[in-house]
Every structure is written in C-alpha cells, then in structure tokens.
Amino acid sequence: MDAGTEARRATGASSAIDWSVAVSTGQRLVKPGPAVPRAEAEDAVRRMREITTVAEQHVRDLTGLGQDLPLNPGEVVDRRAWIKAAADGLAALTDGALPTSDRRGGRYLGSVLAGGAGVQAGFVLAFLSARVLGQYDPFGSADGDGESGRLLLVAPNVVGAQRAMDVPAADFQMWVCLHECTHRLQFTAVPWLREYFAGQVAAFLSGLDDSASVAVGRLPDVLREARKSRAGSGPLGVMELLQSPQQRVVFDRLIALSTLLEGHADYVMDAVGPAVVPTVSTIRERFTVRRRGGGLLDRLLRTLLGVDAKVKQYAAGAAFTRHVIDSIGMDGFNRVWTSPDTLPLRAEIADPDAWITRVHSRD
C-alpha cells in the first residue's frame, strides 16, 4: 500500500467510486450464463486451467518474449468472480488518480456521490461480464499483493461463445488463452510497462476534475465541431474534443499503447498457426462476425461503452504489428518494447513505416 492510500484511509477520505457498491450491483444484475452439465463444466474448467501454460509457451516461442520467466497457470472464474476481480484491478489502478469523494462535496455528500458512481460502474461491469472471454489484469492479484497480476478466463462466456460459433472446444479455448497469455507476457516480460501504463492513466485521470468545468462551458462549441469532424464520431471522438491540450497528449499515448497491446495479442493468437489451433481460420472468421453482432440494445450499449471503438483497436493494432513483422521480422518488431520512447505514436499506428523509420534509424 502506498503512502497516499494510507493517508486517505487514516483521514477517512474515500474513492470517487465506491467499488464495493459496484461489485454488489454488478453481481446482483449479472446472469449466470449458459446451463452446462456439472461434469462438462468441471472438465472445461480443468482444461482451460491447464491450457494457459501450454498457450504461453507457444507465445514465447513465437515472440521471443519472457523465455526465462516461470510458467504459471491462469484462473478460471465465473461472471460474478470476474466482476469482483475487475473492480479490484480498477480500484488499484485508479487509486489516488481520481479525486476523492470528500473533495467532491464534503464527507456525507461525497459518500453519496461515490455510491452513485459505484452503481453506474456496477451496471457497466454486469454488461461486460457477460461478454469478456478472458483478461490479464497487471494490477490485480489473487493473494492481494497487487503486484503479481491475474490471468482470468471467464468459463461460462468461453463455453457460450464456443457453442454459439459451433467450433471445437479445445481449439477455441487455446485460441482465447493465446490472446490473454500474450497480454500477460507484454507486462511480465517488459519490466517498465506496468508502471508506465499506470502513470499515464494517473496523469489522464488527475486532469479530469480540473478540466470538467471548462469542458462544460465549451460543450456547445464541441458539439458543433463534432457534427463536422471525423474525430467527433461516437463517444470517443466527443471525449477527445472535450479534452484540454495537455490531456490530449496523454490520451493519445494511452490510445496508441492500448491499440498496440490489443493488436499484438490479436496477431499472435492467429500467427501461432494451425499446428496449434487447427481451425484457427474458421474461428477467426466466425468470431469477427460475432464481434459485430448483437441486437439493437446490445449495439447501443457497446457504442456507449466504447466497445466498438475497442474492436477497431484490435484491427488497427494487428495491422500495425503484421506490417512491421513482415517488413523487418519479429526481432525488429520487438524493439517496440525497449522503452516508452520506442512505443508507436498514435499517428504511427496507421503508418507503421513511420515507426520503423523513427525507431530503426537510430541503428
């Protein structure tokens, strides 16, 4: 626990979001998932837990990352457990970055506001918990040390997606594990990445409170600009238009980094190849269709929560990764992990040759 956290607890200051309310709300709203016979469920959980170490070895062999790290199994959880784990990770990531509830209106009003924010967060967690297949959270840990990270597979969602797409269970489980194990290696094999990401999130969130009143005053101008600007399409674009210049710089770094991480993982899960996942082409084709699917309400919620923007990140990041590797090989691509200075800029995600020229011209 850092000094800031200890001080806030000692003075009774509380988070801007009451995460215990978020957890209870999310767990109350979420549905358990598809009905699976007990024996089949236990077998799926056992296989998914075992697959994680095998999958990570395949990722290491392809990428060259983390060869000297221990191979640890992941955790297989249900939706309710994922909600608790996700809330714990978010609390650890945002602790100290968001304004305390006391700053937002005094002790009593602050607790009311934090509880309301917790209810809203709970709705979001409930929605996502029915869709997330897996997750590597570098800021969570099963034993509470906050350092080891957690690789989670959400069993009912993996089983439900596999059944809906009518693909082999073993292949789909391996495919999902390849993606999440890539994320785990990104953070465990690149020693500076965890703290860098946390620092960028903290820098962005710490500016939200100061810029909020300015943003509200600019809202009419922003909406007019959004109507005629490509950047203003969707909630992500409006968010960008509301940002101060300082926030935009940090936001661009976060978008570029998250696009790289998601795209790299998407590239790896397909590039490992049919020798490991024989039906990989079929799975990718059907999964891409599934990502775009859903009813009207589902698509609306996905848009409001930025899920559709995240889907675009997968494609853009994978295209960047593929182009760089095809051009200069895996070792050349892995220069991206050297330091924050070698991460791609947001503009370079769409122009990978610019990244190659900038980073490899130093040789």
Image: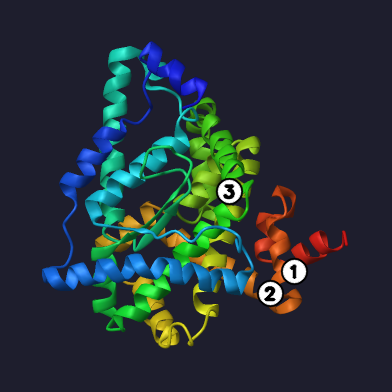
Rate crowding at label 2 as few (under 14), some (14 to 19) or many (20 or more) other CA atoms within 10 Å.
Answer: some
- Label 1 to label 3, Cα distance in Å? 23 Å
- Mark earlier in primary sequence (1, 3): 3
The residue depicted at 35 percent of the width and 31 percent of the height is 17
Q: Which residue is mark 2?
A: 325
Q: Which residue is mark 3?
A: 254
The residue depicted at 45 percent of the width and 25 percent of the height is 99
Q: Which residue is mark 1?
A: 332
Q: Is residue 36 visible?
A: no
Up the image or down, 48 lies above or below 201; here it is below
Q: Position of residue 199 (x, y in %)?
A: 59, 37
- The C terminus, quarter of image: bottom right
Q: Position of residue 121 (x, y in %)?
A: 31, 41
The amino acid on which the numbered mark 2 sits, given as a three-letter code, is Ile
Q: Nearer the viewer, residue 256 or 265?
A: 265
Q: Are marks 1 and 3 in contact (CB under 8 Å)?
A: no
- Mark earlier in primary sequence (3, 2): 3
The amino acid on which the numbered mark 1 sits, given as a three-letter code, is Gly
